[in-house]
Structure formats: structure tokens, C-alpha cells
Image (tube, rainbow, N blue to C red):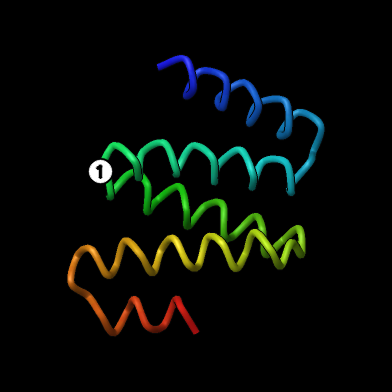
Amino acid sequence: TAALDVLDAALAVAEAADDTGGAAHALNARAIVHFRRAELAEAGALFEAARARARDAQDRGLLAATSMNLGNIATIRGDLQRALSYHR
């Protein structure tokens, strides 16, 4: 889709500029698109990637958001222990 194309471009620009925080936000936005399409495996992988980069960039807000989203995926899958670990 057009949204994913734009996010791919945003990620490429962030990576070319060595902007870890920008890349983290682009990955998170891409994950949200997949989450809203109920493509949970892809969304989860992207949230994990965004979370790792948010940690590297010391972006506490995005780190919290990606953890919450990973917890939401775990809840949908019925893995309540894992969901709880993300929500702590």
C-alpha cells in the first residue's frame, strides 16, 4: 500500500542518516499498519525491531509504546503471562 511505501522510504532515509530514533519510529508505524490488518506475526516482528532501536536511541516513550503493543499482541493470542511481562 501507499502507507507502507512511504514508511519504507522513511526508514531508508533514517538509516542513511544514521538516525536510530527515526528508524525506530518508522518501524513502529509500519508495525501499526500490519497490526490494524490483523497481520500479527509481521506486526510483532516490527514492534520488536522498533523496540530494540528505541532502546538504542534511549527513547523511553517509544520503548513504552512498543512494549504496550507487543503486550496487546500477546493478549490477542491468549498468552497472558507474556502480555503481563510487556505491560510491566
Relative to 60, is 80 above or below? below
Q: Which amino acid does label 1 sit on?
A: Ala
Relative to 2, is 56 above or below? below
Q: Residue at 29%, 37% (x, y): give it.
A: 37
Residue 35: give x, y in percent of width and height. 35, 45
Question: Is 10 left or right of 35, judged from the image as shown?
Answer: right
Q: How crowded is mark 1: few (under 14 residues within 10 Å), some or many (20 or more)?
A: few
Choose top left, top right, bottom left or bottom right for residue 34.
top left
Q: How many labels does the image show?
A: 1
Choose top left, top right, bottom left or bottom right for residue 54.
bottom right
Disc 1 secondary structure class: loop
Disc 1 marks which residue?
A: 38
Query: Which residue is more in the foreground, 32 or 12?
Result: 32
Residue 2: give x, y in percent of width and height. 47, 15
Q: Residue at 54%, 46% (x, y): give it.
A: 28
Query: Which residue is more in the foreground, 13 or 25?
Result: 25
